[in-house]
Image (tube, grey):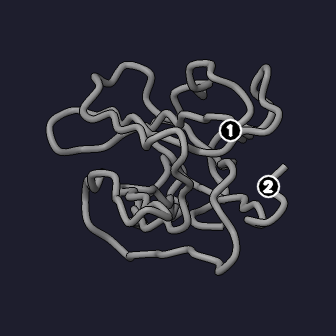
Amino acid sequence: MFGGTSGDYFDDSSLPDFTCHHLSGIAAYGHDDSMESYQFLYSSDDDDQNPIESQIHGNQNSIIIKKFEFDKDENLDTVEGQLINEYSVSPNGTNLTTSRITGLQFFSTKGRASPSYNGRLGQTFTEKFDGYILGYVTGRSNHHITQLQFFWYRTENKC
């Protein structure tokens, strides 16, 4: 799990019709160079339907910056990202620390990579597990995505 505990919880596996799906694309939204929100796309090997789109996690008023979809027969095996901590003081004088995901990039089992969706650079994180592919995402968001957790499927028995 990457990030903090602020924001509203989301779980993309609870999307309608999400049964045997895996992450297959991403859309990044923002203003100028600031990535403020992400939408994840999910495909199934068992059907020829269009990908299921998650809600937009983060600022709902941002304009789309980039969208990328992997091929239907591609699976994702690595994710890299950027995380920053922002410090502020509340009106009552309490010091606050808020985490924010500012960049994401996905890599496939075919050696392809999504564009790097980077905003402000911060601490880099990477997640990869041999013998697993990326299934879906949960996390927390408010104006930005503040937390992400990636769920992985074993390659020999995906669903």
Crowding at dot 2, Cα within 10 Å, few <14 / some 14-19 / many 20+, comes out as some
In front of the other: 146 or 57: 57
Quarter of the rendering occupied by the N terminus: bottom right
Numbered circles on residues, count:
2
Crowding at dot 1, Cα within 10 Å, few <14 / some 14-19 / many 20+, comes out as some
- Residue type highlighted by circle 2: Lys
Alpha carbon separation for disc pair 1 and 2: 10 Å
- Could you tell me residue 158's position as x and y percent? 79, 55
Residue annotated with mark 1: 45
Residue at image point 46% right, 60% down? 108
Of the image marks 1 and 2, the number of the one nearer the N terminus = 1
Residue annotated with mark 2: 158
- Could you tell me residue 114's position as x and y percent? 34, 52
Residue at image point 50% right, 64% down? 109
Compared to residue 58, the image places residue 136 above or below, namely: below
- Could you tell me residue 115's position as x and y percent? 27, 51
Residue at image point 39% right, 34% down? 27
Asked whether, in this view, residue 16 is left or right of residue 118, the answer is right
Asked which secondary structure carries label 2, the reply is: loop
Instruction: Name the disc covering residue 1, or none.
Output: none
In front of the other: 138 or 108: 108
Asked whether, in this view, residue 31 is left or right of residue 146, the answer is left
- Could you tell me residue 134's position as x and y percent? 63, 58
Asked which secondary structure carries label 1, the reply is: loop
Q: Which residue, as the protein is rendered here, is positioned at the far bottom?
A: 130
In front of the other: 137 or 155: 155
- Residue type highlighted by circle 1: Asp
Compared to residue 105, the image places residue 1 above or below, namely: below
Discs 1, 2 touching: Cβ within 8 Å: yes
Asked whether, in this view, residue 30 is left or right of residue 85, the answer is left
Residue at image point 49% right, 51% down? 90
